[in-house]
Image (cartoon, rainbow, N blue to C red):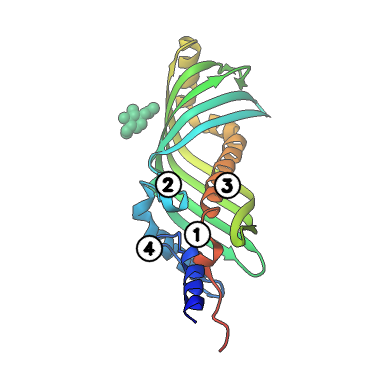
């Protein structure tokens, strides 16, 4: 009997919770599951700025993207760029405007968030690129202030099994992004004159440039969110955040 107890205890201890105590746990069948998740996210908010290492959540403010490779052709745009050490300040002031979840035999969700302001700094290296008639090639550092940001992200997740524990992973994610206003400054090391005229063009009509860049911004945002969410979900067993109803005794 004692052996059995020790065995059972160790089954429990081997599955010690990875999530901190303030982490949300919601009932799958809760008709107000969105409210439960939103309350949970608010409980997490004070910890998000610095990150939550137990569940792979990196610091949100500043949020760092070490490398982004961009390669896209679209109307009025040909861009091939490497962006390094991008840091965004202001991400922890996000407001969740809407959350919709559908957990009936699937994992589907939609979230709308707004951000009053994002200050971004990044190193760039742009080759063989053109925006409208502007030469945007060069290498240097860009700073930008983006205000009135709305992001709608919509996607599906699937359960996966790692060593007999179920986790969720996002399968498909798309995003819509709107930015009300932006101003940039460029410290160009190779071609300062061309960069200065590109920056003044941008600052005089940011919405024209943002419209041209929008498909690229939306695609990049979706890729960054998907990578971020999957890194987090990959460390949280589903059973710790989504509980089933207790079976009838
Ligand atoms: C962005 O905003 C900060 C703080 O308001 C300001 O100091 C900085 O000059 C702005 N940068 C640009 C590129 O407008």
| Camera-side mark, 4 or 3 | 4
**Depicted 24 relative to depicted 199: above or below:** below
Residue sitting nearer the eye, 39 or 243:
243
Disc 4 and disc 3: Cα gap in Å?
Answer: 24 Å
Secondary element at image label 1:
strand
From the viewer's perspective, is residue 73 above or below residue 30?
A: above
Q: CA distance from mark 2 to mark 4?
A: 24 Å
Q: Secondary structure at mark 3?
A: helix
Q: Which mark is residue 226?
A: 3
Task: Identify which residue, 17 or 155, lies in the foreground.
Answer: 17
Q: Which residue is mark 4?
A: 22
Badge 2 marks a residue whose secondary structure is strand
Q: Is mark 3 within 8 Å of ligand 1?
A: no
Q: Label 3, label 1: how many angstroms apart (C-alpha)?
A: 18 Å
Q: Earlier in the sequence, mark 1 or mark 2?
A: 1
Q: Which residue is mark 1?
A: 98
Identify the residue shown where x is 56% and y is 20%.
126
Q: Which of marks 4 and 2 precedes in the sequence?
A: 4
CB contact under 8 Å: marks 4 and 1: no
Residue 212 percent across, percent down from the top left: 60, 31
**In the rendering, at what x and y percent does residue 220 appear?**
58, 38
Q: CA distance from mark 1 to mark 2?
A: 13 Å
- Residue 115, numbered circle: 2
């Amino acid at each position: 009997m004692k052996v059995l107890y020790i065995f059972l205890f160790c089954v429990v201890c081997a599955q010690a919770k990875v999530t901190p105590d303030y982490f949300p746990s919601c009932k799958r069948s809760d008709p107000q599951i969105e409210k439960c998740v939103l309350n949970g996210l608010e409980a997490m908010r004070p910890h998000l700025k610095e990150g939550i290492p137990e569940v792979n959540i990196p610091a949100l403010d500043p949020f760092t993207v070490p490398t982004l490779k961009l390669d896209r052709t679209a109307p009025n745009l040909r861009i091939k760029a490497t962006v390094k050490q991008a840091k965004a300040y202001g991400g922890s002031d996000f407001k969740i405007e809407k959350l919709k979840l559908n957990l009936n035999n699937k994992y589907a969700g939609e979230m709308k968030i707004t951000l009053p302001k994002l200050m971004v700094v990044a190193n760039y290296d742009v080759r063989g690129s053109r925006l409208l008639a502007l030469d945007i090639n060069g290498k240097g550092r860009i700073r930008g202030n983006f205000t009135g940001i709305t992001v709608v992200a919509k996607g599906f997740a699937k359960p996966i099994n790692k060593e007999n524990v179920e986790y969720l992973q996002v399968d498909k994610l798309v995003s819509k992004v709107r930015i009300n206003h932006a101003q940039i400054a460029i410290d160009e090391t190779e071609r300062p004159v061309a960069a200065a005229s590109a920056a003044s063009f941008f600052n005089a009509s940011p919405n024209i440039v943002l419209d041209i860049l929008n498909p690229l911004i939306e695609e990049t945002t979706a890729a960054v969110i998907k990578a971020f969410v999957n890194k987090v979900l990959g460390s949280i067993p589903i059973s710790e955040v989504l509980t089933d109803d207790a079976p009838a005794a």
